[in-house]
Image (spheres, rainbow, N blue to C red):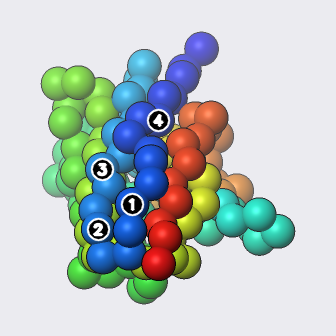
Amino acid sequence: EDQLVETGGGSVQAGGSLRLSCEATRLNYCLAWFLQVPGNEREGVASIYTDNGPKKGTTSYADSVKGRFTVSLDNAKNTVTLQMDSLRAEDTGLYYCATGGLYDGVCRLRPSKYSVWGRGTQDTVST
């Protein structure tokens, strides 16, 4: 059974940084990070193409995090890292990683496209 484990959540003041990691027993097509805020639907934050081939390492980001968040892949460790800088209060919530997500050859940021999920890690950004 494929499993994902997120680590690195915590509390930080606005403007600060946090680094999340997602370790997978097996990478599969894409790995994406999602943010869930109570009362809201889970939203895609960033994705990276993890399979071997010309698209490997291709990333995509939600508009709200472009220029602030960076997703990267360590293939040797089956781990994807989300570096979050210039954090804002609206970045607060539960962060999940998930694998799957490939649709029409592109890693999508839609939760319904992903089949394996971690349990999530809480990040809190205070003002």
How far separated are the C-alphas under marks 4 and 1? 18 Å
How far separated are the C-alphas under marks 1 and 3? 11 Å
Q: Nearer the viewer, residue 71 or 99?
A: 71
Of the residues shown, which amino acid type is indicated by label 4? Glu
Q: What numbered label is drawn on residue 19?
A: 3
Which numbered disc, 2 or 4, marks the residue that appears first in the sequence? 4
x and y, in percent, of residue 74 in the image: 19, 36
Cβ atoms under marks 1 and 2 closer than 8 Å: yes
Q: Residue at x 62, y 35 (%)?
A: 119
Q: Residue furthest right?
A: 39
Q: Is residue 98 visible?
A: no
Q: What numbered label is drawn on residue 16?
A: 2
x and y, in percent, of residue 75 in the image: 20, 32
Q: Quick check: 110 above or below 90?
A: above
x and y, in percent, of residue 66 in the image: 32, 80
- Which structural element holds mark 2? loop
Which numbered disc, 4 or 1, marks the residue that appears first in the sequence? 4
Residue with the mark numbered 4: 6
Query: Are there few (<14), some (14-19), or many (20+) residues within 10 Å of tag 2?
Result: some
Q: What numbered label is drawn on residue 26?
A: none
Cβ atoms under marks 4 and 1 closer than 8 Å: no
Cβ atoms under marks 2 and 3 closer than 8 Å: no
Query: Are there few (<14), some (14-19), or many (20+) residues within 10 Å of tag 4?
Result: many
Q: What numbered label is drawn on residue 12?
A: 1
